[in-house]
Image (cartoon, rainbow, N blue to C red):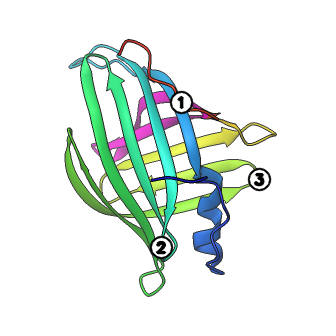
């Protein structure tokens, strides 16, 4: 896709407009939380969000999680009838479709995918160019730490370290 991915979407729905905070290219770094089954792994990648016609977002990811390469594309849209976000993802780590809840309030981004059992909570820097947060997974009826990440907005298309 060419052009600036940051233009404001013209869709008047607040549920769509709040996605604007994600638009752009982000360097994602962090670490998974080690478990009895898996040691911690370093996360290094690029996430990019661009508007698509109709007020949905295209999210692409190109990352390494430890030794695993994760590359894929996701479309995120808002379904007014169901009053939730719907997504469809295809990537090297599989395919998924899920309903999600999203909230951006007081500088805190919350993204919940209860049908998948994942959720993210992160805080924005004052200039909204850094998000620092953590992912959790629902296991045995309780939320367990999964990974800690920092996303830093990029002006250019950097390559993740180690490529």
Reply above or below: 91 against 6.
above
Marks 2 and 1 close (CB-CB < 8 Å) = no
Residue 22 rendering spot, x and y as whole percentages: 59, 51
Circle 3 — which element?
Answer: loop
Q: What is the span of residues highlighted in magenta in the rendered image?
A: 132-153
Q: Indicate which disc residue 48 carries.
A: none
In this view, the mark in front (2 or 3): 2
Viewed as shown, does residue 68 lie left or right of 15?
A: left
Q: Is residue 147 magenta?
A: yes
Residue annotated with mark 2: 53
Residue annotated with mark 1: 27
Mark found first going from the N terminus, 2 or 3: 2
The residue at 38%/12% (across/down) is: 162
Residue 3 rendering spot, x and y as whole percentages: 57, 54
The residue at 43%/51% (across/down) is: 59
The residue at 50%/52% (across/down) is: 2
Q: Which image quadrant: the C terminus?
A: top left
In this view, the mark in front (3 or 1): 1
Q: Is residue 109 visible?
A: yes
The residue at 42%/63% (across/down) is: 76
Q: Is residue 141 magenta?
A: yes
- Residue closest to the eye, 10 or 152: 10
Q: Residue furthest right?
A: 126
- Quarter-of-image position of residue 35: top left
Residue annotated with mark 3: 106
Viewed as shown, does residue 105 lie left or right of 138?
A: right
Marks 3 and 1, how far apart at CA: 23 Å
């Amino acid at each position: 896709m060419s052009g600036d991915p940051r233009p404001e979407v013209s869709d008047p729905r607040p549920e769509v407009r709040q996605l604007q905070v994600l638009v752009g290219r982000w360097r994602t770094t962090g670490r998974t939380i080690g478990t009895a089954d898996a040691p911690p792994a370093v996360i290094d990648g690029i996430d990019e969000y661009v508007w698509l016609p109709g007020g949905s977002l295209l999210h692409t990811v190109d990352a390494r999680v430890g030794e695993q390469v994760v590359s894929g594309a996701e479309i995120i849209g808002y379904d007014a009838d169901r009053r939730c976000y719907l997504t469809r993802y295809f990537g090297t780590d599989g395919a998924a479709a899920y309903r999600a809840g999203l909230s951006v309030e007081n500088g805190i981004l919350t993204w919940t995918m209860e049908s998948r059992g994942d959720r993210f909570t992160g805080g924005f820097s004052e200039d909204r160019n850094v998000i620092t947060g953590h992912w959790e997974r629902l296991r045995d009826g309780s939320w367990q730490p999964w990974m800690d990440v920092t996303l830093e907005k990029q002006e250019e298309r950097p390559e993740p370290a180690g490529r």
